[in-house]
Image (cartoon, rainbow, N blue to C red):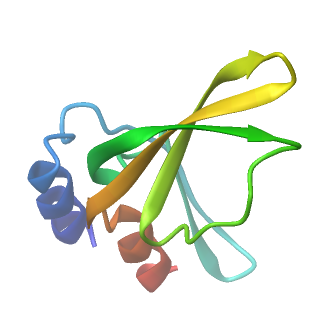
Amino acid sequence: MCEELKQELIKFDYLDKYEITQIKEKFGSLRWYDNGYPIGKLELIGIEEYEDGMPEHDRNTDWYRYLGVENNKAQYEHYKILDKCKVGDIISKYE
């Protein structure tokens, strides 16, 4: 598991930034807590503005970053995920 995680973190240049905060067993299952990991390699598509919140979207292929609210509208940077980081998938596989 650790070798798989290491290779994925190297791929996204995040090995030195990744920190495990706690590892334990609970109810017969592995619990792995960390300080987060990158979403993946992203390409900025543009800035979108929405009223009444953000519409549903496909979280497997898109990512949005909240920029703020002005005049009752929310603004988000919209990114296309070019290469998804699989750290979460690797951890889930072993849990």
Residue 61: x %, y % from top left: 42, 69
Residue 63: x, y in percent? 48, 53
Residue 63 relative to residue 27: left or right? left
- In the picture, the quarter occupied by the N terminus is bottom left
Looking at the picture, how far across and down is residue 7, in whole percent?
Answer: 12, 62
For this orientation, the residue located farthest to the top is 70
Q: Which residue is depicted at the point 32% across and 39% down?
A: 18
Is 48 situated above or below 11?
A: above
Tell me what residue is drawn at x 26 percent, y 47 percent: 43
Looking at the image, residue 40 sits to the left or right of residue 23; the answer is left
Against 24, residue 69 (above or below) is above
Quarter occupied by residue 84? bottom left
* Near-viewer residue (83 or 44): 44
Which of 23/52 is in front? Answer: 52
Q: How many marks?
A: 0
Residue located at (76% from left, 20% from top): 69
Give me the residue at 53% from left, 45% from top: 64
- Point out residue 90 in the picture as x, y percentages from the top left corner: 36, 74
* Left or right of 37 in this view: 43: left
The answer to whether 54 is drawn above or below residue 59 in the figure is: above
